[in-house]
Amino acid sequence: MIRFLCLGLWRDRSRSLFPLLTVIMGVMLTVLMFSWIMGFAADFLGTSARLGSGHVAVMSRAYADEKDQLPNDLALTGAGELSERLRRDFPSFSWTPRIRFAGLLDVPDENGETRAQGPAGGLAVDLFSAGSPEPGILDLGPALVRGTLPRQAGEILLADAFAANLGIGPGATATLITGTMHGGMATANFTVAGTFRFGAPAMDRGMKILDIADARADLKAQA
């Protein structure tokens, strides 16, 4: 009987081949779409945590209420002591300070007059401290397109597309015009050490990365 049924299914393609192909294609599409969606979600969350918010962020309550406006006048002070306490109490996390801000990047010509300028977001991280995890977290080495990573104070990295729009490259000098934590205006000159591309449009359109010590000095300055 079983042999008879198997022969019947094999000879009648409408009862064997087409249902089998339908099941196979359905399973393949389900697995493909599930894997694609899960991969996209994991990549999106990982990129956001690595380049932006981190997996856990510690900030003042006032800053959290207005964080979309990057209100650095409401940011935490004494971050060094707080970081040490967090590392001691939660050693499984990698704690590192970051500052996000925005400003205008001005590129002068040979006469010191404005040749090009554009608005840019700023990300200040610990680039120079021994054992700092930030270069690895941001994958700065693989993301580097031209030039080198900053090696000393006063050097920054620019998004490659942003640098191309401004017509500058490694070795160029640019002036950052931004607001201080006290509501004033601050300006600082930087040398472009290199350019990067993360593959994240929000970062690649107009972003600069600098050492956090430079950012702290500039955002505290009064103009």
Image (cartoon, rainbow, N blue to C red):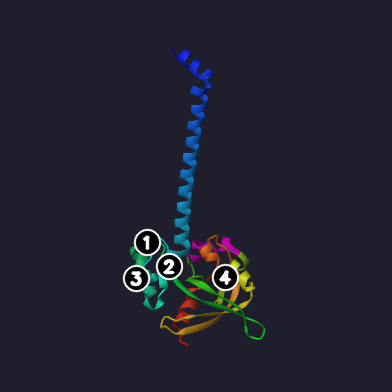
Mark 1 lies on residue: 91
Instruction: Give the numbered dot on residue 31.
Output: none
- Rounded to the nearest angstrom, the CA distance separating label 4 from label 1 is 32 Å
Residue 163 occupies which quadrant of the picture?
bottom right
N-terminal-most mark, 4 or 1:
1
The type of residue carrying mark 1 is Pro
- Rounded to the nearest angstrom, the CA distance separating label 1 from label 2 is 12 Å
N-terminal-most mark, 4 or 2:
2
Q: Residue at x 53, y 74 (%)?
A: 119
N-terminal-most mark, 3 or 2:
3
- Label 1 sits on a secondary structure element that is loop
- Rounded to the nearest angstrom, the CA distance separating label 4 from label 3 is 29 Å
Q: Where is residue 207 in the image (x, y as percent from the top left)?
A: 53, 69
Say if 123 sits above or below 1 in the image: below
Q: Could one spot residue 77 in this view of the protein?
A: no
Mark 3 lies on residue: 65
